[in-house]
Image (cartoon, grey):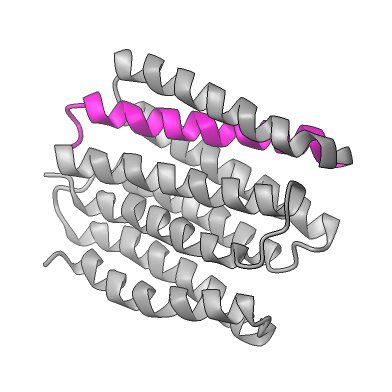
Amino acid sequence: MKPAWWTAPLLAVTVPLLVRAGILKEWRRVYVLKPLSTLIVIAAASLSYLRPERSATYTIGILVGLTFSLAGDVAMIFEEKREALLVGLASFLLAHVAYAVTFGMLGRSSWWDVLSTLVLAVVAAGVYWLLKPNLGAMRWPVLVYIVAISLMVSRAVSTLSSDAFGTGQAVMVTVGAVLFYVSDAILALCRFWRPCRYRRGSLAFYYAGQLLIALAASGFG
């Protein structure tokens, strides 16, 4: 088994505990478990350096994105405060830009891009339409964020046509990006559309997606 894969069992322990702590509002545990879970994902990407076949471009790009994600995760612990929410959005926006650039550099344009872009445009428009009445001053930040995450998923899909990635590896990247998108969509809908008691469950999608993207760094060669 590749060294990076040993991080998966660790995350399988911390994420359920994190979700439970969030639902029960055990904030002290959240303060520890959320950054810890993201650090485990960062370790998963970093362990690709033990493999001679690694892609420095991919690993560095993903680590940059994960570093911004860590900042976003810490800020979003205090998301009820508007300032913290804006910092979180900005941090994750930069994470999506880092991912999109990385996927775009190694991906390859194809008809899949056209199809995925059309689908993402429809989904993004639908989500924004639901959120818009309750966004207020957050309208533009949220719109920019939706565009950025949609671009990130579109660039992830481009890896499916790239010779730089193995088939399984490209699927991991694509599914990981989609799970990240689903997680953020759940959070946005629960915050700005209809309150959801168990919205913390979106963290399972988030960490699963991040881990798949990170583990793909060990799939080159």
Q: Position of residue 192 (x, y in %)?
A: 76, 48
Q: Is residue 164 magenta?
A: yes
Q: Residue placed at 11% from the left, 44% from the top?
A: 221
Q: Is residue 84 above or below residue 151?
A: below
Q: Position of residue 44 (x, y in %)?
A: 32, 63
Left or right of 36 in this view: 76: right
Left or right of 20 in this view: 170: left
Q: Residue placed at 38% from the left, 80% from the top?
A: 13
**Looking at the rendering, in which quadrant would you find the N terminus?**
bottom left
Q: Residue placed at 55% from the left, 29% from the top?
A: 123
Magenta extent: 137-166
- Report the front residue among 139 and 2: 139
Q: Is residue 172 magenta?
A: no
Q: Is residue 92 above or below residue 26?
A: above
Q: Position of residue 116 (x, y in %)?
A: 40, 23
Write down the quadrant of residue 30 in the picture.
bottom right
Write down the quadrant of residue 164 in the picture.
top left
Q: Is residue 109 visible?
A: no
Looking at the rendered structure, the number of numbered marks drawn on it comes to 0
Q: Residue placed at 68% from the left, 68% from the top?
A: 77
* Secondary structure mostly taken by the magenta-highlighted segment of the chain: helix
Left or right of 29 in this view: 11: left
Q: Position of residue 36 (x, y in %)?
A: 49, 75
Outermost residue on the right side: it is 137
Left or right of 9 in this view: 201: right
